[in-house]
Amino acid sequence: MKIFLFFAFAFSALCLDAQQHTFMVYSVKGNVTVNQNKTDTKAHIGNLLEMAATINVPKGSVITLICDQVGLFTINKPGKYNISTFKDSCKQSSNSITANYLRYVWAQMSHGSATPSTSRKLFMNTVGAVSRSVNNIWIDPRLDTIIYASGSFPLSWKSYAEAKDFEFSLFTKEKEGQPIFVAQTEALQLPLTSLQKTLNAGNIYYWTAAIKGEQNDERKVIKVINSKERDEYIASLRKSEDAFETEAEEAFRLGFQLEESHYLADAYSYYQKAAELQPAVALYRSTLMAFRKDYDVQ
């Protein structure tokens, strides 16, 4: 019996050791090359690597890899490395936002047919339940809560009726009270910048939109913070990942994390920055376009 258990444990350990992992190039600086299937190529963002591949990192070069969609690690010392030696790095990040982000990047880079407009939200934990108010106005659940310090971003809605005139209302209470700000508009949105004189840091506000002459009891949240608090939060996100990233990759990650954390105006600015810094990376461009479409950013 003891001999049987010994071989059983040994077999399990052997199977675990033989487990195959897949790696993806997340970030690269310098002339890093990859040998895979007996072919040498320059490492590029999005390259999928199997355990049999080897990486040559010259002096002054750096490469960061994702393993199995969840692990992230950097090789910054010159040398030639067999990918299989990094199998212990295939551990899920303890940061759930980072883990969601890595899965998103992996899915988009490895399956080009998926569109960010339909798949990005699947990797976030912030989307509420879809609902439709009885007065023909629908507000996207992604706008249930916005954390706002500054910047341009629209509060938007959809109308199921052929209406041309709408009324935007801002409240200090969730379910009752008179609005502290009312605006008439023919557009299906109101820019947050038009509320800056009304919004005060440290307060929570509630907003809704209705067809003129009607009432909408569904109210969404705007949590207003000061720029210092916003900047400190972004600084904490920068520190949350110690793997090497270029400025563009960091900006894109921050955009994703800020969107998931409801900092929508700031997320937009970082998605823009990533696309401007690396216009050749299709994922950055397509995600920015999807973000604009999702939130009616014009």
Image (tube, helix red, strand yellow):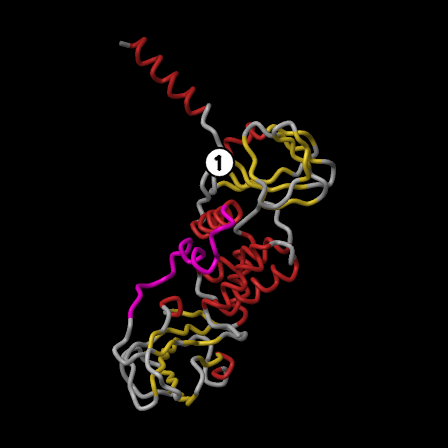
Residue 206 coordinates in the image, percent (x, y)? 36, 78
Residue 142 coordinates in the image, percent (x, y)? 39, 66
Judge left or right: residue 61 versus residue 18.
right
| Residue situated in front as seen by the camera: 108 or 190 | 108
Answer above or below: position of 124 versus 71. below
Q: Secondary structure at mark 1?
A: loop
Answer above or below: position of 29 versus 190. above
Residue that mark 1 sits on: 90
Residue at (61% x, 46% y) in the render? 45
| Residue situated in front as seen by the camera: 104 or 70 | 104
| Residue situated in front as seen by the camera: 94 or 84 | 84
Residue at (39% x, 84% y) in the render? 168
Residue 234 coordinates in the image, percent (x, y)? 53, 61
Residue at (49% x, 32% y) in the render? 21
Judge left or right: residue 224 versus residue 144.
right
Residue at (48% x, 38% y) in the render? 68
Screen quadrant of the N terminus: top left
Which residues lie in the magenta part? Answer: 111-131
